[in-house]
């Protein structure tokens, strides 16, 4: 991603750290926690189904980091990732898929397709994480995606989503967080909620990265999406044909007064300034 200077300065090493930073690696280190995500999926599946899940589809897969984690977990696991961005799919092939062993590599496929129209075969699990489906800005298009996901599942398959909200969610703000890469190099992840329209609930959000030499990678990622509420998401999932939709809310570590990383089905959530939850939809 970027390296600490270990030699006398040269024209190349004098470059700001932002100039050599890889935005996809930065994203994976600051935003994604694929191990915890797959842990939740496997645990929840085992609680709801008496058979093992084998085939997983990662919608809006980006670099397919989560799909790769799935095939690493078990020799029987297969995965397909679907995304419209060919550049990010190619990055995922060159980095994440390239790190798989040959046997694992044979059990994963990436498709440059629209998640609404893709037909890679029926799967046990579909994921749409990192709020990716918020890109659908109206009920009709979101319902169409959910209906297509339902059509892509086996009869006892499960759709897993995440969602976020809280009274700070529609605010214009910036939230910095200190992170580091796999080599211990530090950087700052900055989440910016740049604009929000209360009339249609659409907003513009950006991710910036800042480095120890004060160089910045501005708007490494930008999103224009709708801030969907949990009642809306639930209602649209039911309208699309799902028969059971559960909200998995994070518990609280009373000693630290923060989330404990344990998500359970809930009908009452805390009115926190910011929260993230999982949504589990069954046919």
Image (cartoon, grey):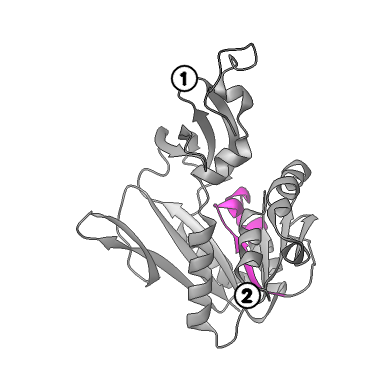
Residue extending farthest to the bottom is 50
Q: What stretch is highlighted in magenta?
A: 123-142
The residue singled out by tag 1 in the image is 214
Q: Give yes or no for contact between labels 2 and 1 (Cβ–Cβ under 8 Å).
A: no
In the rendered image, residue 134 lying in the magenta stretch gets the answer yes
Asked if residue 47 shows in the view, the reply is yes
Q: Which residue is drawn at 71% across and 48% down?
A: 92
The image shows residue 261 at horizontal and vertical percentages of 37, 61
Label at residue 59: none
Q: Which of marks 2 and 1 is in front?
A: 1
Quadrant the N terminus occupies: top right
Asked if residue 201 shows in the view, the reply is no
Pick the front one: 165 or 34: 34
In the rendered picture of this protein, how many numbered marks are placed on residues?
A: 2
The residue singled out by tag 2 in the image is 241
Q: Is mark 2 on a helix, strand or loop?
A: loop
Quadrant the C terminus occupies: bottom right
In the rendered image, residue 265 lying in the magenta stretch gets the answer no
Left or right: residue 184 versus residue 24 is left
Q: What element carries label 1?
A: loop
Q: Quadrant of residue 52?
A: bottom right
The image shows residue 100 at horizontal and vertical percentages of 70, 58
Could you tell which of marks 2 and 1 lies nearer the N-terminus?
1
């Amino acid at each position: 991603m970027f390296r600490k200077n270990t030699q006398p300065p040269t024209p190349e090493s004098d470059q700001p750290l932002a100039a050599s930073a890889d935005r996809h690696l930065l994203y994976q280190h600051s935003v994604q926690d694929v191990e915890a995500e797959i842990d939740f999926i496997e645990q929840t599946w085992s609680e709801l189904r008496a058979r093992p899940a084998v085939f997983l589809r990662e919608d809006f897969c980006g670099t397919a980091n989560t799909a790769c984690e799935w095939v690493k977990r078990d020799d029987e696991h297969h995965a397909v990732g679907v995304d419209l961005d060919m550049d990010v799919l190619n990055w995922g092939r060159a980095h994440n898929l390239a790190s798989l062993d040959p046997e694992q590599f044979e059990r994963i496929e990436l498709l440059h397709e629209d998640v609404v129209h893709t037909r890679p075969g029926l799967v046990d699990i579909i994921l749409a994480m990192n709020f990716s489906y918020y890109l659908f800005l109206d009920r009709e298009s979101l319902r169409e995606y959910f209906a297509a996901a339902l059509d892509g599942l086996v009869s006892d398959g499960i759709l897993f989503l995440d969602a976020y909200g809280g009274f700070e969610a529609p605010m214009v703000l910036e939230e910095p967080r200190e992170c580091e890469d796999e080599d211990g190099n530090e950087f700052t992840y900055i989440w910016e909620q740049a604009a929000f329209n209360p009339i249609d609930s659409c907003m513009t959000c950006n991710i910036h990265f800042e480095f120890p030499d004060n160089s910045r990678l501005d708007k490494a990622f930008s999103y224009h999406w709708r801030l969907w509420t949990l009642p809306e998401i639930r209602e649209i999932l039911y309208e699309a044909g799902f028969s059971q939709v559960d909200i998995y809310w994070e518990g609280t570590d009373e000693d630290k007064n923060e989330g404990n990383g344990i998500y359970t089905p809930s009908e009452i959530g805390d009115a926190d300034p910011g929260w993230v939850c999982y949504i589990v939809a069954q046919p």
